[in-house]
Image (spheres, rainbow, N blue to C red):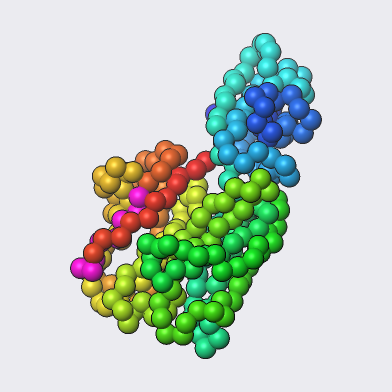
Amino acid sequence: VTGIPSGQQAWLAAWFDWNGNGVFENPGERAFFQAATALVDTVDFSVPPGATVGTVFSRFRLAWNGNDIENPMSAGPVCDGEVEDYAVVIIPVELGSFEATQDGDGVLIKWTTHSECENLGFYLYRSPREAGPYDRISDLIPGAGTSAGPQAYSYRDHTATPGLTCWYELADVTTAGVETLHGPVCAGGPQNQGIVLLDVPAPHPIVDQADVRFVLPARCPVTLTLCDFAGRALVVIAEGIFDTGAHVARVDRAPDGHRYGSGSYLVRLATPFGVRTRAVVFAE
């Protein structure tokens, strides 16, 4: 909330159509109702258990008189103020990290989440090639259901062949049975095989900033670029000569003061070994 004069107070109410039925009048769908006094005021809220995964809508009403927007006044006339509606995408899992490391006892796969919504659990898939096909290697690994806090998971793949490169994909599974894939990530010595890796940025989807990890098989020139989904370059994330091994660069949604809108974009890594891309999503 911006623009409230110093020393004055307005009232802000918000509703979220958590069950996706097109109205805001159901119990629990008013997310908050509170005074707004600062020039800039930020409000946090949690997604409740049972919320619809996918696109739902929210409504924000601001008024000088709080009685005008008392529950359940998501609609109807008031003397003054403002009403704004926004589409909100509720994702089942906001992935924090996903990595696989080969050791003397197979491959250890670890991942973290920043939040989960109606998440039944996870499946892991493996392939000897990045392009697949992938075979499922795990039973359902229980998730946290609905959680606004971070969670950490791990799985050991004892059936991986020692010394051979393998690729893994992670699928989160909603309570409705819908799977969403993450990855792939590689285990098995990419630096010895001339493979360039470009991981999915974390956290993802990207709200403001995220870190993207890439691994180089040799010292070489690198250009890491944020592009629109048609492949047109928007801004250079990192550029220069990078040493062998893993590196992390910061993807900034507003690198030059211009905030890129919500939607799908590409992160493109160009090296003498070729070009790799990752699809990324900017979300509110």
Quarter of the rendering containing residue 108: bottom right
Q: Is residue 271 magenta?
A: yes
- Please state if 189 lies on the left or on the right of 238 as rendered: right
Q: Main secondary structure of the magenta part?
A: strand
Task: Specify start and end residues of the magenta stretch as a single range.
Answer: 266-273
Residue located 70% across and 51% down the image: 146
Q: In the image, is residue 31 above or below residue 266?
A: above
Name the residue furthest left. Answer: 272
Residue located 65% across and 62% down the image: 140
Residue 98 image position (x, y, % from top left) = 52, 65
Q: In the image, is residue 283 above or below residue 277?
A: above
Residue 116 image position (x, y, % from top left) = 64, 52
Name the residue furthest bottom. Answer: 104
- Please state if 18 lies on the left or on the right of 233 as rendered: right
Q: In the image, is residue 241 above or below residue 284?
A: below
Viewer-side residue, 114 vs 168: 168
Which part of the image, by quadrant, shows the N terminus?
top right
Residue located 69% across and 44% down the image: 46
- Please state if 125 lies on the left or on the right of 232 as rendered: right
Viewer-side residue, 210 vs 125: 125
Quarter of the rendering containing residue 132: bottom left
Q: Is residue 281 magenta?
A: no
Viewer-side residue, 46 vs 189: 189
> Can I make out residue 51 in this image?
yes
Quarter of the rendering containing residue 33: top right
Residue 27 image position (x, y, % from top left) = 79, 30
Q: In the image, is residue 90 above or below residue 155?
A: above
Residue 25 image position (x, y, % from top left) = 74, 24
